[in-house]
Image (cartoon, rainbow, N blue to C red):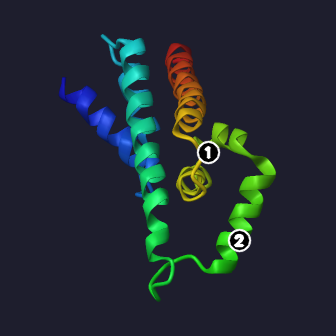
Amino acid sequence: MWLYQGLFLSALSSATLLPGSSEVLLSGLAISENANLLMLWLIATLGNVVGSCINYWLGCNVMHFKDRRWFPVSQRQLEKAQLQYTRFGSASLLFAWVPIIGDPLTVFAGVFKMKKRLFVPLVSLGKGLRYAMVIALAVEVEQLF
């Protein structure tokens, strides 16, 4: 049970702006002797989506501080991000799983007030597919050796 909780927390933190990599833990668990691959996939996906929802929430609320000197993003950078977001639209969230760019995508979805009913399915689809690929690759590599 604690392995599933650890996987959930690892996937959650990996989806936030905190550094992390849940793929290594998921791969190790997937090749373990009594692995329930569906359960691993569900837990990792759920944790990662919840982490992205935290980013979304932060994005919704961070603009209250945009006039503060310590605010890490300039007005010019915000305008550039909004232009890119408008250009690629909500479908860009299918790439929320991509390292480095994925986390900011979910924050900006909150900043630009994307509808939650569109945000959650798009992020879930992308992250679910990514974790399915991680599990499939881990199992395939394990069978080779």
What percent of the width, then of the height, locates residue 104?
Answer: 57, 57
Q: Residues within 10 Å of mark 2 (few under 14, many from 20)?
A: few
Spatial distance from mark 1 to mark 2, Cα to Cα? Answer: 22 Å
State the residue in front, 63 or 33: 63
Q: Secondary structure at mark 1?
A: loop
Q: Which of the 4 image quarters holds residue 48?
A: top left
Q: Earlier in the sequence, mark 1 or mark 2?
A: 2
Q: Position of residue 12 (x, y in %)?
A: 37, 42
Residue designated by label 1: 98
Question: The residue tagged with tag 2: helix, strand or loop?
Answer: helix
Q: Residue furthest bottom?
A: 69
Q: Which is nearer the eye, 66 or 54?
A: 66
Among all residues in the image, which is located at the extreme right?
Answer: 87
- Note whether 133 is above or below 104 in the view shown: above
Left or right: where 93 falls relative to 110: right
Would residue 139 appear left or right of 13 to someone viewing this image? Answer: right
Query: Where is residue 49 drawn, in percent x and y?
Result: 45, 36
Q: Nearer the viewer, mark 1 or mark 2?
A: 2
The residue nearer to you, when weighing 78 against 43, is 78
| Residue that numbered label 2 is attached to | 79
At horizontal 65% and vertical 71% (from top left) the residue drawn is 78
- Which residue is painted at 34% across and 18% down in the image? 32
Q: Amino acid at mark 1?
A: Val
Q: Residue at x 70, y 62 (%)?
A: 82
Q: Height in image: 54 above or below 61?
A: above
Local packing at callout 1 (Cα closer than 10 Å; few below 14, some 14-19, many 20+) is some
Task: Point out residue 137 in the picture as x, y percentages from the top left corner.
Answer: 57, 23
Residue type beneath disc 2? Glu
